[in-house]
Amino acid sequence: EAGPVDLSRLLSELAADFAFQGGAQGKDVRHRIAAGLVVQGQTGLLRRLFGNILSNAVFYTPHNGEVLLEAGGEGGDLRISVRDFGPGVPEAQLEDIFRAFYRVDGSRSRQSGGVGLGLAIAREAAFRHGGRITARNALPGLEIIITLPCTPRCGI
């Protein structure tokens, strides 16, 4: 059931959860989340979207590294970005990583036992909420950017 979702709260809870998980490896999840961000959507689907992205970011961030989560308004939309400080992805494969079962050759995939569904699920969830998702190499690391439409109550 779709309805207003307190995105600021949801992202803050996920950041705390993943900071706890990464803590054993010295991985810190830092966040800068604007207050009062509200999106029209499904809480469970949004939780999976951002949970999958944060899970990848924590996984690929080196020991004693950090993940950066930022959320706020940009150009009338909500912009959420998650950056890791891992090996990044070859430029030619930045779009492919959102395809179901796609695995990057090299260091990102050799370490993982995943099947390549997390980012495909995240992309579908973003689309279902009228948004989009992109990836870019942040040098170092990978940054995933999710843009969601602002509703009248979105808080920006």
Image: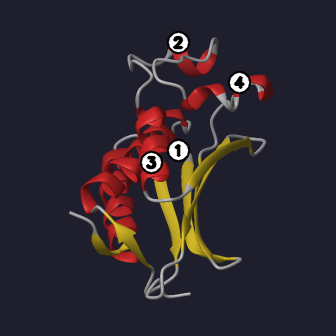
Residue matched to label 4: 93
- For numbered disc 3, what is the local secondary structure? helix
Q: Nearer the viewer, residue 46 or 26?
A: 46
**Number of other residues with Cα within 10 Å of mark 2, as a class: few under 14, some 14 to 19, many 20 or more:** few
Q: Amino acid at mark 2?
A: Arg
Identify whether 75 is placed above or below 143: below
Viewer-side label of 1, 4: 4
Q: Amino acid at mark 3?
A: Leu
Question: Where residue 142 sits in the image (x, y, percent)?
Answer: 66, 41
- Of mark 1 and mark 2, the one earlier in the sequence is 1
Q: CA distance from mark 1 to mark 2?
A: 20 Å
**Number of other residues with Cα within 10 Å of mark 3, as a class: few under 14, some 14 to 19, many 20 or more:** many
Residue matched to label 2: 110
- Of mark 1 and mark 3, the one earlier in the sequence is 3
Residue matched to label 1: 64
Identify whether 124 is placed above or below 97: below
Residue matched to label 3: 54
Question: Where residue 118 sits in the image (x, y, percent)?
Answer: 41, 33
Q: CA distance from mark 4 to mark 2?
A: 16 Å
Identify whether 149 is placed above or below 61: below
Q: CA distance from mark 4 to mark 3?
A: 20 Å
